[in-house]
Amino acid sequence: MSVHADSFLRVLADIEDSLTASHIAAFPVWCCKSDHDSERLHQEIAPGGQRDYHHVPVRDEDGHIRTVVYRDDLGGKRGPARKNGRLIGVDHKFEASRPLLDAIVRLKNTGFLLVTSLESGQPDGVSGIINHADLQKLPVRLLLFARLSELEATLREIVTGSDWLIRGDCSNERKYAEGERQRHNKGEEDLPLEQYLNLKGLVAVAQRLNRFVPQERAIEDRLTSLRAVRNHIAHGLEFGNGDTPSPEETVKAVQDAFAIVEWAIRSVVS
């Protein structure tokens, strides 16, 4: 985010810059030994079992993680865990100090991340792990809320000082804002009317001012998705469909939420 004179936007920038992969990673990472029995491991990590894990790193005798066991691969498998694990690639390792948003993007192709840090004490530096379930944690919501708040604050700046209050094509938004001001203000000093516009109204006014100019098609669908993300964060709902979304559904839902907000931010004409 660029440096901005508005103190609120500077606070949002500080929040985004300070959130890292370490804020959602699970420490320490639980690993099984290379000779761990696969049948017993399957029972241990089954849903409702001792450890409800989708991915279990296998730490070899030399202290390095080279393979990870996937719970979905273990059904009916026998033998040592090292024979039933999948080799990790360089993309599976991620530094704890790197930005949280970068970790969310990386998860799209990896499914999990082995988090490294100098303080790990392990030969390979791996100290934690990020799975799909970690995307439901508060730091992810905080980051998404900061991006949404940045969008809303920028749109309000665009609207402030413009001629939107006297434009005929903004009459519906003006009536909405007047109604909100009357509903919320009980004898208190009135704030500028644009402060009572919701996200939908801000976008509508900015469009008419030619300051919100999306390049992509299906704009209405995207704006509906944007409002849905705003409501999702406001009501603390989990990402994904249903009570127990799959790992793929969770990762996709989080990435889609960030993508639609980034699309809206890119559509603002400075």
Image (tube, rainbow, N blue to C red):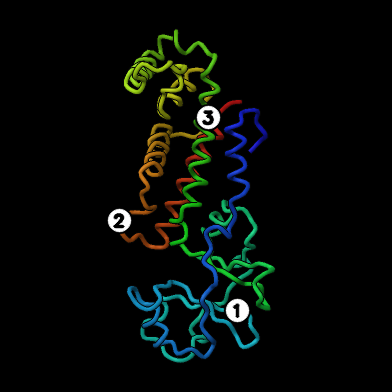
Q: Residues within 10 Å of mark 2 (few under 14, many from 20)?
A: few
Q: In the rendering, at what x and y percent does residue 24 appear? A: 52, 59
Report the residue at 51% width, 17% height from top. 209
Report the residue at 62% width, 62% height from top. 96
Quadrant assignment for the N terminus: top right
Are the residues at dot 3 and dot 2 in contact (C-beta closer than 8 Å)?
no
Q: How crowded is mark 1: few (under 14 residues within 10 Å), some or many (20 or more)?
A: some
Q: How far apart are marks 3 and 2 (CA)?
A: 32 Å
Q: Distance between the residues labelled 3 and 1?
A: 46 Å
- Which image quadrant for residue 220? top left
In the rendered view, would you say 80 is above or below 251?
A: below
Disc 2 marks a residue whose amino acid type is Gly
Circle 3 SS class:
helix
Which residue is labeled 2 in the image?
242
Which residue is labeled 3 in the image?
153
* Numbered label attached to residue 267: none
Which residue is labeled 1 in the image?
66
Circle 2 SS class:
loop
Disc 1 marks a residue whose amino acid type is Arg
Report the residue at 49% width, 31% height from top. 152
Q: How far apart are marks 2 and 1 (CA)?
A: 34 Å
* Dot placed on the residue nearer the N-terminal end, 3 or 2: 3
Q: In the rendering, at what x and y percent does residue 81 appear? A: 49, 86
Q: In the rendering, at what x and y percent does residue 131 appear? A: 48, 64
Q: How crowded is mark 3: few (under 14 residues within 10 Å), some or many (20 or more)?
A: some
Circle 1 SS class:
strand
